[in-house]
Structure formats: structure tokens, C-alpha cells
Image (cartoon, grey):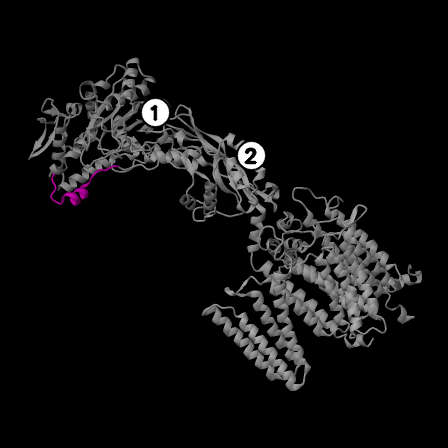
């Protein structure tokens, strides 16, 4: 398994040091943030004490380095050959986890190994990525074949379901990041677009259902925005997928015009629920598009009409299902996921405190260990899911920009590396790694900034915890190992 | 492999998504961190708990060093509304001995910003004030059951003696207008409300300290911010020494029992007030603690107005004590000489004007006229002054001259005593009569002011100050009650001599007249073998029974004390005024009362004047 000696030199030379520098820089900044977040004003400086989280994080960092070295020393063909076995092993572990786990805050995702608790869900990511990459790199694989596509999806939906059963919905949602990779591998863009739209309609519709729009009581913000977005997306799809300008202009003129007219009438004359007008506009538009499809014999108009009708159906059924079909505890879980509940002290406490922490940082921040919001535990989960608050409060805008810049550099670099892989296996795995990192950064930083739902997933290399740090390290270093071996076959 | 090439352009879409996400987040960070400092303020108010440390209020002593007012610890219950979760209010009410209604009402009051301007749901608000040590210790055991409730130690005032309530005054919670006037105060603070407590508030209160603590999300204190670098220690208030003589004050209050009125005694050489009695009085201890409001209401409802400080807030006709000021004015203006004699046939009779007088020899020169308190003499004097067209062009000019003399003696305006709410009394001037009587008024229209009646009113303090001025033969020092402020020089107002418009020589004649009143006139009962008393009675007419007034000083040479006694509806000056004044002087000069005087004091103390129960 260990790479032969004559490859040692070549390995070091072909290793992507750029990514490793970013990795080390993120770990360093991450450790500082954990120090800041776990430091207590009334206890002295004791960052290296293994009884503290900052001390333990050093242990995780050092072991991660060792883990990285270990992975680099494995022959890259190992991952190709053993991907199904690794996947199976982790699926078994995931399935078993709820039964052997000890419950932490209602989560059944942690199992005890000696003195440590580990979270198998964090390790299932690289296993799933390997397995999907392996399956998709078979020579007879074709993503446009339904069978292949469905099996691919099942490969990452299976761990997703198992993790939901561990009551870790947030970690489970990470697997939807694989769609980004699928897009690169030829999944029609419209599928990705439909998927993203569906999530958007669902989140916006449910999250802002109870908020009046523009202060007009009868109008639900959630419904207004969903309708408006559907209309805008329909217009966008018409421009991209059809060539005739007249239908586009007609819908633009009447759709937007009528919506605005109704809105101003409702605001200044007589308040009424204009979403009925919007609904009528969308139904007429759909009917018009179907008529166009018949007239021009073009199925594209039908798909766009189906998109509009599908969006409407999703929106109405989501609210209906949430309010009338789901059990109260299920409703709660959805609401918690969307950040509508789980704040013991009133609406949005967590997100407000997180915003206060970041907002109080200013340009340069309050300085290392000088943050009050995070130190004094105003921010929940400040050294895990909300760790970015510490960066914002102590290092300010500049610190945040540096951290986000590093993440962006990492993601773009991973795309670059993935593209230079000689085989589909490496490329697919690389895109999976990139997608997972992007999803984590997008959701984690977004929720801290109050832009995305509060989904409890860690910020890679920052959040305290051995499992997630090991998980991300393995995920990244397997890809670095594959990348380092990219010239092996072409040169020989 | 064909897919690879076909879709490789999509890397730009994916990279673009990443770039857009990061850019949106940077924009969001920019607005959060750089466009407003609201978040910074929120973070500060979250994290910094400013714990006020209250300084000890200054103690108050009498001129002999006897401790009159000091501090005792009491405990306030504070509440942080945002931290009140799952509080069993019934249990709380039971533990504090209050009912649910009171609790609900208090909560509404606390959260009402119009009544509680400093309200914030994140800071401590006063819930209930001044628990005693026993109440506190029983509540403290249960405190853990009531999150959001805190105990704050405060000092409350304690009074060693039940005397001098009007002088000492009291402290109470600041009103919204106090907070508005001086941002030193916060809701729930205490401020001097009356008496010395109010007029020396700045000296007594000290300077609040502040401790800046770090507070975590659960309200737990995590130590001092920057190791206390920004903390300030409280500066204790300054102690006051009053010029008041406690024993004299106690005697005065004793003598005035069952009577309405006032006694003011001044040390002429310094202007220090030795006693300032206003009757009825009350026990200052009623104004402490949570019973303050109830007791205050009760006293406020009393028809005899015990809360009114008659010594400086009561304005009365001075009656015949005022004649001394007239004699001085006429002498100085050359209207009379000590030898000038006026006839008095049971009073002043002229052009149908009639001012009665009691029987005595006639005509009388000045000194016996003062001694017997002849009304006729002073009416003639004023008549001749106001109708003197050689000195004054018209009656207005004469009247203005007269008024200037009166004002120079401390009448008609506040003297400037260091107690709140002093009244100025009334000295009419020419304009006043022009307005009220028309331009045609004559000396006869105003003749009664010469005997301290009519429009003239003085406060008992002004009458006592008149005595001090005569004792000093021509000047007074603004009367004051505080002799010494710890570590601070006394206001120079209280050491400056104010000379009247009358020369020392003319004062000697009036002194002789006042001595004559004691040796062979209206004040004979004030005579004693130990020192020479000078005095002047007054019997002031009013709508009811006459007021009994006395003004005097002793000894005649090197006077130690000047005193004014005013007993409402007490009848003749000699009935109450003279004996009370004599006892006060004896007590102060001899340090004790003789056996005979003690017996007299006891009989006066027991005398009751019946006033009825109508509001006065």
C-alpha cells in the first residue's frame, strides 16, 4: 500500500502545495478563533491546557496533520479499488450509529470510542464521494440514462436518510451538495435550477409566511415573494430557452405591470391580498405558454409552464403540509431548521446575538481574546457552528475578508485541480470535495450573517471538534493524493 | 470522456457561484460591520454591567457634636425584566409580603417609560425599596428561586432624636423632574427632599462610584472589565455640623407643645441659628423607610400643617416687635430725637383715625414709649415722617425711604437662610399703595404699619434677625443653620456683615427702650438676676384671637442670643411670648434652667391653645 520509494520525490514535487498552504492557514486562524471562543475572562490564559477546548483543538490539529501524512503515503489506486468497501463499511456504521450512540442534545450521531466521541456522519462524506466517483467513472456510465442517474442519487441519498435518522438533519442536507458535482458531470442545468428554485420557494414561502409584506397586513411576504420569483424565473427561462421576443415582452408587461398596480392599490387605496392577483397572473401565463406550445409545436413552452405550475403547487402544498399534515414535532423540526424557532428568549435571539457579535467588530475587530459577545456566551454554539462570530468580533471586517478569501481560493483551486485530473474518478471526487466545502461555507457563514436558515453544520477547519476536522482533512487529502499521482500514468 | 470536454465550461458556472456567494457575504459583512455602530452599542450593553456603588451620605451633628442623623443599611430589591423567566410570582409576593395586585401594578410602573425614564429591560430596575435587615435575610434565602431579582444594599437615614424635623428634612426617591434636572440621578436614587438634606444635597450625597463588570448571557458576573481600570470608587458625602443646639431645640419644641407657632434663636455675632422650632412638629423617623409615603400623606392631611416650617414659611404680622424698627428709622431720619415725646390718650386719634392703646402716662419720650409699647407714639412718628414735606417731596418719596430702611433690616425679601422654601414676607412700598389705594392715599391710610400691623408681614426668622441686628447695634449676618461642612469652607454669605441704614448710636436708644420693657414695661417676667435681658413684646391682631409675640436678646452687652417667639392666637405678648423667650435665653446662657424656671417651663408646656380642626 505504501508508495514505493522511487515515487517519494515525485510525490512531494507534484503535491499541490498551494492548497496545503491554504489548509494550514485556515487551521491556524481556526485555532485562534477557538481560543477566542472558548476563553473565559475569569480564567487565565491556558490555551495549551488539554482540559480546555483550545488545548484539545491542538490535539485534533496535530493528529489531522499526521492523518494527512498517512493519506499522502497511501497509493492512490487504493482509493479507487476500495471505494465501494469503504462506502459499505461507513453505511453499516451509520446505520448502526443510532443504536449504539449516546444522546447529546437529542442527537444520536455520536459514538464513544475510548475517551473520545466521534461522529461517523463526518466520515461518511469522503466515503460517499469516493463511491459516487467510482460508480460514475465506469466506462458505460451515462448520466442521461435514468437508471444511472437514479442510482447515483441513491448512493448519496442513502447516507442522507441514515443521518436524518440520527436526528442530524443539518449534516444530512450537506449531501445535496452532490448535485453541484452532478451538474458539472452533465446533469441538465435545468434540473439544478429546478432544484435550487424548489428549495428557494420552500424556504422563502415557509420562513416569511407570517410576515406582512411592506406593512400591508393581508399580504404574506413569503407568498408574495414566491409568486414574484416564479414570474421572474419564467421570464428568465423564456429569454434563455426560447427565441421569440413577443411572448416575453407580453408577460413582462402584463405580469409585472399588473402586480405593481395591484401592490400600489393595496398599499395606498384599499389593503387587500394581492397574491390572488399574482396567482391569476401565473395561471394565465401558464395557459398562454401551453397555447404557445401547441401553436409553435415547441415543448420548451410546456416545460416553462410546468415550472410555473410546479412552483405554485410546491408552495401551496408546502404550507398546507406543514400546517395540516405534519405532526407538531415534525413542524417544529422544520421550523428549527429554518431558524424560526429554537430561540429560548424570543424571536431570533441566536441570529440577533450573532449579528451583534459580528457587527460590533468594525473594521479591525476588538482584538484577539477581546470579544465580549462570544466570550460571555451571548452567541450560542460559539466555538462550533457559530465560530465565524468570533472571527467577526475579534478580527473585524478585515479578518472576515481574509477568511472568506482563503475559502474562495480553496474552492477555486479545487475546481482547477479537479479539472486537471486525467480520469473521471479523480475529477468527480474533486468536484465532490469542492461542492461539500462550498455548501458548508455557504450555509455556515450565511446563517451566522442571518442570510440562510440556521442549519447546524460546522465551518470547515474552524469549528471545534475532532470528527469534523478529521473528516475534512481526509476528504481533502485523499484528493490531494489523487492529484499528486495524476502524472503517473501519463508519463510512464 | 466526451462528457468531460462537453461540460468543462460548467466549471466557470460553479466557480462563479462560489465567487458570487463570497461577494454577497462580504457585502453583508460590510453593512453589518462598517455602516453602523448600533451593533457595537448593543454588544456593550449586553456585556457591561455598570454596578453603581452608592456612597455613604454625610452625617449631621449639632453644634455640640451630638450625632443627629446617620446611615443604616437597608436593602432594595432590584429586577431585570429580561431575566425574569419562570418566576413564581405568587411565591415571590408571599416571600415579600405583598399581594399580586401590587406586584402587577409595580411591574407596569417599572415598564412605563414616562414614569421611569431610565427603563431598560436589560438593566436593574428598582422593584421594592428599603427592606429591613430581617426582611432581607429571609428573602435572601429564597432569592435563587427568583431569577432576575437582585438585592442591592443601600443606606437609609436614621435620626437619633425625634426633634428638629423641619431643620433636618428628609430624603426620598428622586422624582422624574429631579432626574431631568440633574443627570447624576437615576431612577431609584435618593435625594434630599426637605430641610438641610435638600439645601446641602450636593455636599451630603457624595459621588457615586461605578464598577464595570462583565456579564455573560446568563447574567453571571465574570469579573471586572480590564481588571477594574475604568472603575470609580464612591466618594462619601461630607459631614455637616449644624449651628443648632439640640438641647435648646428640644426645650423649644417642648414649650411649643399644643400650640401653633415658632421659636427662632440666633447667635447675633455669627448669624448662627441656635434653634428653629416650628410647631406642630413631627418625628423625623416617620419619614424613613417604606412607611414614608403613608406617613407623609397622613401629615399632609393634618389641618395644623405639621409639614409647614412656620419659622421660615409662615408670614405673620410682627405686631409691636416691629416698633423697634420704626424707632430706628425715625431717629436716623431725624423725625424724632430720643427726647421727642408724643401724646397718647388711650391711643392715636387724628382726623377720625383711631388706633387704640392701653393705659399709661402721656406724653412719653422714646425709651418709655418702647418700654410700654405705646401705639400712639409710633403712629405719630410715621405720620410725621410721611407728611414731612421738607425732607421728602411727596409721600411716595417718604414711603420709599421708609421701605429702604425696612429692606436694609432684612425685611421684605428672603434673608437667604440655608434652608429650602424661605418666604420673603411683605413690606409695602409706594407703588403698592398707589395701586391699591389710588394716588390720593395719605399717611393715615397706612398708619397701622408703624405698629407692625396692616400690610406688613414677617417670618419668625426675620423677627429673630431683627433682634440679632439690634443686639449687634446695626448689622446682621445672614442667619444660617449649618456651621461647618467637612473639608469645605463655609459660604462667605454666612460671614458677611450686612449693615442697616441706621447708625450704631441710634441703636443704643432702642436697646435702652427694650431694656426698659424688661425692667419696667411689658416684658417684666423676662427679668432675671443673672444677666440683663432686652425684649419687646408683640400682640398681633388678626382675624382670630391675637398672636402672642416676643423678640429679645441677652445679655444687653455682648449678646449671646437673640430670640423670636411667635405663638399663634396666644393672646398678649406677655402671656406666651415673654416667658418662652426668657426660658430659651436662660437655657442657652446658663446652660440649664433654674428650679423656678423649670416649673414655669412645665406649666407652659402643658398649656393648650385650642385651634379647632379647620384647615389653617
**Where's residue B14, x and y in %?**
72, 70
Quadrant, the N terminus of chain A:
bottom right
- Residue A216 at x, y percent in the picture: 50, 65
Q: Residue at x 77, y 64 (%)?
A: A156
Count neighbours of disc 1 (C-alpha within 10 A) and say few if under 14, some if 14 to 19, many if 20 or more. many
Image height of B2 relative to A344, above or below: below
Q: Considering the numbered disc 1 on the image, is that residue within a helix, a strand or a loop?
A: helix
Instruction: Kindly identify which residue carries mark 2.
Output: B140
Give the residue furthest to the top: B595
* Closer to us: A77 or A255: A255
* 2 or 1: tag closer to the N-terminus: 2
The subunit letter for the residue under badge 2 reads B
Q: In which quarter of the image is the C terminus of chain A?
A: bottom right
Q: Disc 1 marks which residue? A: B249
Q: Residues within 10 Å of mark 2 (few under 14, many from 20)?
A: some
Q: In this view, does A441 lie above or below A113?
A: below
The answer to which of B409 and A223 lies nearer the viewer is: A223
B441 in the magenta segment: yes
Amino acid at each position: 500500500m505504501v508508495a514505493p520509494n522511487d515515487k517519494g520525490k515525485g510525490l512531494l514535487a507534484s503535491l499541490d502545495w498551494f492548497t496545503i498552504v491554504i489548509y494550514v492557514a485556515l487551521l491556524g486562524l481556526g485555532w485562534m478563533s477557538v481560543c477566542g471562543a472558548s476563553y473565559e475572562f475569569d480564567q487565565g490564559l491556558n490555551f495549551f491546557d488539554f482540559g480546555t477546548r483550545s488545548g484539545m483543538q491542538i490535539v485534533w490539529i496535530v493528529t489531522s496533520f499526521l492523518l494527512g501524512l498517512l493519506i499522502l503515503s497511501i497509493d492512490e489506486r487504493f482509493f479507487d479499488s476500495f471505494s465501494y468497501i469503504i462506502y459499505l463499511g461507513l453505511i453499516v456504521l451509520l446505520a448502526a450509529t443510532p443504536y449504539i450512540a449516546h444522546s447529546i442534545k437529542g442527537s444520536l450521531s455520536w459514538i464513544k470510542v475510548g475517551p473520545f466521541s466521534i461522529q461517523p456522519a463526518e466520515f461518511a462524506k469522503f466515503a460517499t464521494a469516493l463511491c459516487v466517483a467510482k460508480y460514475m467513472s465506469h466506462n458505460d456510465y451515462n448520466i442521461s440514462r435514468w437508471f444511472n442517474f437514479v442510482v447515483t442519487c441513491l448512493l448519496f441519498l442513502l447516507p442522507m436518510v441514515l443521518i436524518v435518522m440520527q436526528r442530524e438533519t443539518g449534516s444530512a442536507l450537506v449531501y445535496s451538495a452532490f448535485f453541484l458535482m452532478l451538474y458539472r458531470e452533465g446533469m441538465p442545468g435545468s434540473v439544478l435550477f429546478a432544484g435550487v428554485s424548489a428549495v428557494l420557494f420552500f424556504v422563502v414561502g415557509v420562513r416569511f409566511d407570517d410576515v406582512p409584506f411592506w406593512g400591508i397586513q393581508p399580504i404574506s411576504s413569503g407568498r408574495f415573494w414566491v409568486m414574484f420569483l416564479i414570474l421572474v424565473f419564467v421570464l428568465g427561462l423564456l429569454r434563455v430557452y426560447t427565441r421569440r421576443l413577443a411572448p416575453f415582452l407580453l408577460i413582462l408587461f402584463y405580469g409585472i405591470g399588473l402586480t405593481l398596480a395591484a401592490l400600489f392599490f393595496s398599499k395606498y387605496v384599499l389593503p387587500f391580498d394581492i397574491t390572488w392577483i399574482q396567482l391569476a397572473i401565473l395561471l394565465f401565463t401558464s395557459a398562454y405558454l401551453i397555447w404557445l406550445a401547441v401553436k409553435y409545436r415547441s415543448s420548451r413552452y410546456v416545460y416553462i409552464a410546468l415550472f410555473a405550475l410546479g412552483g405554485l403547487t410546491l408552495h401551496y402544498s408546502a404550507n398546507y403540509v406543514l400546517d395540516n399534515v405534519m405532526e407538531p414535532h415534525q413542524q417544529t423540526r422544520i421550523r428549527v431548521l429554518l431558524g424560526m424557532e429554537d430561540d429560548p428568549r424570543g424571536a431570533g435571539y441566536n441570529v440577533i446575538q450573532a449579528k451583534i457579535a459580528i457587527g460590533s467588530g468594525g473594521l479591525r475587530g476588538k482584538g484577539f481574546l477581546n470579544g465580549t459577545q462570544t466570550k460571555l456566551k451571548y452567541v450560542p454554539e460559539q466555538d462550533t457552528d457559530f465560530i465565524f462570530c468570533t472571527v467577526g468580533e475579534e478580527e473585524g471586517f478585515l479578518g472576515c475578508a481574509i477568511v472568506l478569501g482563503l475559502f474562495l481560493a480553496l474552492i477555486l483551486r479545487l475546481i482547477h485541480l479537479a479539472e486537471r485530473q486525467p480520469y473521471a474518478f479523480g475529477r468527480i471526487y474533486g468536484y465532490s470535495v469542492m461542492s461539500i466545502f462550498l455548501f458548508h461555507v455557504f450555509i455556515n457563514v450565511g446563517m451566522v450573517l442571518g442570510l440562510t436558515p440556521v442549519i447546524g453544520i460546522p465551518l470547515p477547519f474552524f469549528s471545534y471538534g475532532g470528527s469534523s476536522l478529521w473528516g475534512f482533512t481526509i476528504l481533502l487529502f485523499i484528493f490531494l493524493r489523487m492529484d499528486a499521482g495524476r502524472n503517473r500514468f501519463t508519463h510512464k | 470522456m466526451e462528457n468531460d470536454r462537453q461540460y468543462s465550461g460548467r466549471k466557470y458556472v460553479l466557480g462563479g457561484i462560489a465567487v458570487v456567494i463570497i461577494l454577497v457575504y462580504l457585502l453583508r459583512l460590510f453593512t453589518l460591520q462598517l455602516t453602523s455602530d448600533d451593533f457595537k452599542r448593543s454588544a456593550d450593553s449586553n456585556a457591561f454591567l455598570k454596578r453603581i456603588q452608592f456612597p455613604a451620605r454625610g452625617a449631621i451633628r449639632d453644634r455640640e457634636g451630638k450625632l443627629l442623623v446617620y446611615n443604616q443599611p437597608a436593602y432594595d430589591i432590584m429586577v431585570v425584566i429580561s431575566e425574569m423567566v419562570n418566576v413564581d410570582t405568587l411565591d415571590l409576593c408571599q416571600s415579600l409580603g405583598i399581594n399580586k395586585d401590587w406586584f402587577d401594578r409595580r411591574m407596569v410602573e417599572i415598564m412605563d417609560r414616562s414614569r421611569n425614564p431610565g427603563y431598560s429591560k436589560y438593566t436593574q430596575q428598582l422593584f421594592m425599596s428599603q427592606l429591613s435587615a430581617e426582611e432581607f435575610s429571609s428573602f435572601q434565602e429564597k432569592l435563587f428561586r427568583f431569577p432576575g431579582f437582585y438585592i442591592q444594599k443601600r443606606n437609609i437615614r436614621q435620626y437619633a432624636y425625634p426633634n428638629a424635623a423641619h431643620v433636618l428634612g428628609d430624603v426620598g426617591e428622586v422624582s422624574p423632574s429631579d432626574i431631568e434636572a440633574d443627570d447624576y440621578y437615576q431612577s431609584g436614587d435618593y435625594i434630599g427632599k426637605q430641610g438641610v438634606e435638600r439645601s446641602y444635597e450636593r455636599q451630603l450625597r457624595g459621588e457615586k462610584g461605578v464598577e464595570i463588570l462583565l456579564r455573560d448571557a446568563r447574567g453571571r458576573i465574570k469579573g471586572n472589565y480590564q481588571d477594574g481600570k475604568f472603575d470609580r470608587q464612591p466618594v462619601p458625602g461630607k459631614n455637616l455640623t449644624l449651628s443648632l443646639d439640640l438641647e435648646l431645640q428640644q426645650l423649644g419644641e417642648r414649650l411649643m407643645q399644643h400650640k401653633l407657632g415658632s421659636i427662632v434663636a440666633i447667635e447675633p455675632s455669627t448669624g448662627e441659628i441656635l434653634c428653629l422650632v416650628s410647631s406642630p412638629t413631627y418625628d423625623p423617623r416617620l419619614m424613613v423607610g417604606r412607611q414614608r409615603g403613608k406617613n407623609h400623606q397622613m401629615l399632609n392631611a393634618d389641618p395644623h400643617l405639621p409639614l409647614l416650617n412656620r419659622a421660615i414659611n409662615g408670614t405673620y404680622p410682627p405686631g409691636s416687635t416691629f416698633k423697634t424698627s420704626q424707632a430706628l428709622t425715625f431717629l436716623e431720619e431725624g423725625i424724632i430725637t430720643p427726647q421727642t415725646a408724643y401724646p397718647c390718650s388711650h391711643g392715636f386719634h387724628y382726623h377720625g383715625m383711631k388706633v387704640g392703646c392701653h393705659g399709661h402716662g402721656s406724653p412719653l419720650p422714646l425709651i418709655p414709649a418702647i418700654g410700654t409699647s405705646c401705639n400712639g407714639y409710633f403712629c405719630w412718628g410715621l405720620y410725621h415722617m410721611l407728611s414731612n414735606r421738607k425732607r421728602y417731596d411727596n409721600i411716595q418719596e417718604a414711603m420709599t425711604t421708609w421701605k429702604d430702611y425696612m429692606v436694609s433690616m432684612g425685611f421684605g425679601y428672603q434673608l437667604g437662610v440655608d434652608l429650602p422654601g424661605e418666604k420673603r414676607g411683605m413690606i409695602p412700598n409706594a407703588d403698592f399703595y398707589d395701586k391699591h389705594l389710588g394716588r390720593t392715599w395719605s399717611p393715615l391710610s397706612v398708619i397701622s404699619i408703624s405698629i407692625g400691623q396692616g400690610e406688613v408681614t414677617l417670618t419668625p426668622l426675620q423677627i429673630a434677625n431683627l433682634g440679632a441686628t439690634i443686639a449687634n447695634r446695626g448689622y446682621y449676618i445672614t442667619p444660617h443653620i449649618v456651621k461647618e461642612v467637612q473639608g469645605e469652607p463655609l459660604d462667605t454669605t454666612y460671614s458677611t456683615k450686612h449693615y442697616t441704614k441706621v447708625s450704631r448710636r441710634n441703636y443704643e436708644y432702642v436697646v435702652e427702650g427694650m431694656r426698659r420693657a424688661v425692667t419696667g414695661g411689658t416684658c417684666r417676667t423676662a427679668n432675671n438676676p443673672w444677666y440683663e435681658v432686652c425684649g419687646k413684646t408683640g400682640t398681633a391682631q388678626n382675624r382670630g384671637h391675637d398672636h402672642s409675640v416676643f423678640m429679645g436678646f441677652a445679655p444687653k452687652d455682648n449678646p449671646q442670643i437673640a430670640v423670636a417667639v411667635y405663638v399663634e392666637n396666644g393672646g398678649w405678648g406677655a402671656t406666651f411670648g415673654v416667658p418662652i423667650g426668657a426660658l430659651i435665653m436662660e437655657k442657652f446662657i446658663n446652660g440649664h434652667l433654674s428650679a423656678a424656671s423649670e416649673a414655669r417651663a412645665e406649666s407652659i408646656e402643658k398649656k393648650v391653645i385650642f385651634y379647632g380642626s379647620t384647615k389653617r
